[in-house]
Amino acid sequence: MADIRVLCVDDSALIRKLMNERLNALEGITVIATAPDPFIAAEKIKNMNPDVVTLDIEMPRMDGLTFLEKLMKVKPLPVIMASSLTDKGAEQTIKAIQVGAFDFVLKPQPNSEEHSVDSFIMELAQKIRSAAKQSLQKKRFSTDSTAKSKSSVSGEASERIIAIGASTGGTEVIASLLTALPDKTPGIVITQHMPPKFTKAFADRIDSMALIHVKEAEDGEVLTNSTAYIAPGGTQMLIRRVRDHFRIVVNDDPPLNRHKPSVDVLFDSVADTGASGTLGIILTGMGADGADGMKRLHDAGCYTVAQDEASSVIFGMPNEAIKRGGVDKVANIEKIIEILQSSVS
C-alpha cells in the first residue's frame, strides 16, 4: 500500500521539524510538505493533494479554525488539529471538531511524561492512520445548534442511569445524542476520552444547544434527572449508590487501559450500583476501553447498545464490546437516539 501523504501546518519551525523528521521515520507515513501558515498551506493542498492535514490551532495571519472552515467548504480533507493545553486551545478545538476536523492531539508539554514528544508522535501517527481510512461522510450527524431554554428541568434525583462511553469521533456523536433529547430524561454519565480543560469546553458547548443540562462532573454531586455529566479530563469518574440516590465520585485513580478518564472505570461502577433500568451505550473509538465494562453491565441485567460500524468513525471500541458478548443491540445514531428518547419517563 502507498504511504499516507501528510501536510503539516504549524507556525512553529520546531514543531514542523519534529513532525517532518519523526513521522517520516515511521512506516506507512510520508510528510510531503510543511507550511508555516494557512496561506502557504492552501497552495500546497491545491498543488500536492495530501491525504491528511495536521493543523495548528493558534497561528498568525489566520487561525486554524478559520482555515478549517474555509477548507471544509472547498476541499474537505481529513484534518487533525494540534492544540495547546489552554482554555482558548480547548474551546477552539471543540469548535474545530464540530466544523469537521477528524480529531485532535495535544502538542508536547515541557516536563510532562504524559504529553512528551514520543507520546505526541505516537498518538499523532495513530490518528493519521485512522483518518486516512475514514470516509468524511461518517462524521456528518445532525446537531441542532440553536440555543434552547431549559424551562422544565426538575433537578430531582435520578432513579435510573444512562452510561455512555466514547473516544475518537465521539464528540460529534454525543452532541447529536444530547441535543436530540427532551428535557425530562434520567441522569446521564459520560466518559469521553479527553484531556483536562477540553471536557469543560465540550460540556459547555453542548449545554448551549441542548434542552437538558450538560456539565463537567464534580465530585460528590447527586445524579439528577435532565442532566448529563461529562467525566473531567485527567480524572476517573465513578457512580456510587448512597441510600436512595446515586452520587458521582471524581478521583485521581491511575489510568486504566491507558485512559484517564476510562470508560471501563465508569461502566464497572455503574454495574456495581445494581440500578434497575440502566442503559449502557458504547460509541465510536479506538482500542478496547469499555468493552469489559459493557460485558459487566450486560451480565448485571442492564440493556446495552453499541454503535454500528457504518456510522462509527472508528469501530474499535464497539467492535470489542460486541466480540466479548456484552452487547444487546447494535444500532446507528438515529436508532440510538430513539432508544434514548424512549427512556424518558
Image (cartoon, rainbow, N blue to C red):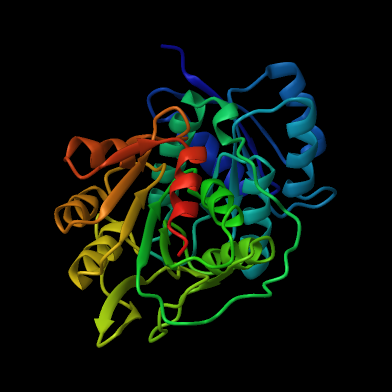
Relative image position of residue 342 (x, y in whole percent): 45, 53
Q: Nearer the viewer, residue 219 or 133?
A: 219
Relative image position of residue 289 (x, y in whole percent): 28, 50
Relative image position of residue 296 (x, y in whole percent): 17, 56
- Vertically, is 226 above or below 325? below
On the image, which quarter does residue 159 sit in? bottom left
Residue under the image location 52 percent in, 52 percent down? 174
**Residue farthest to the right?**
61
In the picture, measured across the screen, residue 150 lies left or right of residue 104, that is right
In the picture, measured across the screen, residue 74 lies left or right of residue 125, that is right
Relative image position of residue 93 (x, y in whole percent): 63, 54
Residue under the image location 30 percent in, 61 percent down? 278
Q: Nearer the viewer, residue 327 or 261?
A: 327
- Vertically, is 124 above or below 29? below
Q: What is the quadrant of the C terminus in the image? A: bottom left
- Vertically, is 66 above or below 107? above
**Residue farthest to the left?**
299
